[in-house]
Each structure stands twice: as C-alpha cells, then as structure tokens.
Image (cartoon, rainbow, N blue to C red):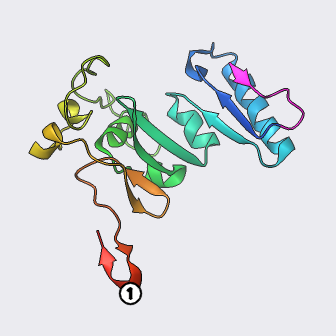
Amino acid sequence: RLKAARLPSPKALDSFDFAAAPSVNRPQILELMLEVRKETGDASIMLITHDLAVVAETCQRVAVMYGGKIQEISEVNALFGDPLHPYTQGLLSSLPRPDKEKKERLDTIPGIVPSVMNFPQGCKFWTRCAEKIDRCEQEEPELVETAPGRFCRCHLVEAAPIAAEGGEVNR
C-alpha cells in the first residue's frame, strides 16, 4: 500500500508490505515514490522491506529490526560497509555479492526465529548469535550511539564517548 503519493505536496511517503507486492509492481511502486520525492524536493520515504538490494539503491538511512525492536540505525553506506550488530552482519553475509567470490551456498543465520509470543529474556537475538556472551541471555542491551548518527543494540558494541561539561569524557 502506498500512502500520500497522490497528495498535492506530500511530506512523507510510506510503503508497507513492499516485499509482498508482486515483483512486476515493485519497480513501478518504487519509481513512483522516488518521483514524488524528486518533485517535492523534501518528501521523506519510509520503506519497510526485507529487500536489502532496494535499501542499498534507494535509502539514505536504514534501521534494522529484529524481535520487534530496532537493532541498528545507520547511514546506508556505513551499514553495508561495516555492519555492527551480529544480526545485520548475518543478513548482509547471506546476500549474493558480485564483488565476492561465488559460493555454492549462501551463508545463513543459524537457528530458528523465536515466536513473537515467547522471545527469550535478554537480547532478542542471543539464541541465534554466534558471538553471544553470558550477559546477552539476561540483560537486553540498550540502543546506544556508537558514532554520530549511528546506533546499535548489542553488548559487544561500545557506545561512543560523550564529552561532559568541562571536557571530561563519560561512557
């Protein structure tokens, strides 16, 4: 469903269930959204999709979600170049890449996605994470800013130091 595309001067567009659209319609929907953004000069597009190729081609910023929570927020080039969260790393390593050696099988994220009715305590991804530490099982990490405009929800990723009054660095 595409909202606001026919309004005289939309400030925001959203496209939910984009991945569920028949593949023949996806390019047309995306082209329409980008056309509206170009015409208005300042419309924002919120695209909810599993299609990371579309994200790479059209988005400036991206939020990666798992377990109903944002796990990573980044400019798209930084995310594809240096993913911080283990889930994001797994997603990107499962994509075919023309710049990488061709594999017989693509990588997968191990394990099974837990039921939304029964997510584990602690980090929502720990049951599938190859890098988990004990803390992951007990304590859900906060979404922390790791660099200006870059955020991650993972105990393995440190927050960027923030200068307090007087120039002292706090964590």
Residue denoted by label 1: 166
Q: Residue furthest left?
A: 134
Residue 139 drawn at (x, y percent): 19, 42
Q: Residue furthest front?
A: 165
Q: Residue furthest bottom?
A: 166
Q: Which residues are magenta?
A: 1-9
The answer to whether residue 146 is above or below residue 169 is above
Q: Is residue 168 magenta?
A: no
- SS at mark 1? helix
Q: Nearer the viewer, residue 108 or 140?
A: 140
Q: Nearer the viewer, residue 102 or 117?
A: 117
Main SS of the magenta part reads: loop
| Residue at position x 46%, y 48% in the image | 73
Residue 8 drawn at (x, y percent): 90, 33
Residue 92 horizontal side relative to residue 21, left or right:
left
Q: Where, by quadrant of the figure, is residue 9 drawn?
A: top right
| Residue at position x 25%, y 24% in the image | 119
Residue 54 horizontal side relative to residue 167, left or right:
right
Q: Quadrant of the C terminus?
A: bottom left
The answer to whether residue 19 is above or below residue 167 is above
Q: Nearer the viewer, residue 169 or 146?
A: 169
Q: Is residue 2 magenta?
A: yes
Is any part of residue 103 visible from this angle? yes
Q: Where, by quadrant of the figure, is residue 128 drawn?
A: top left
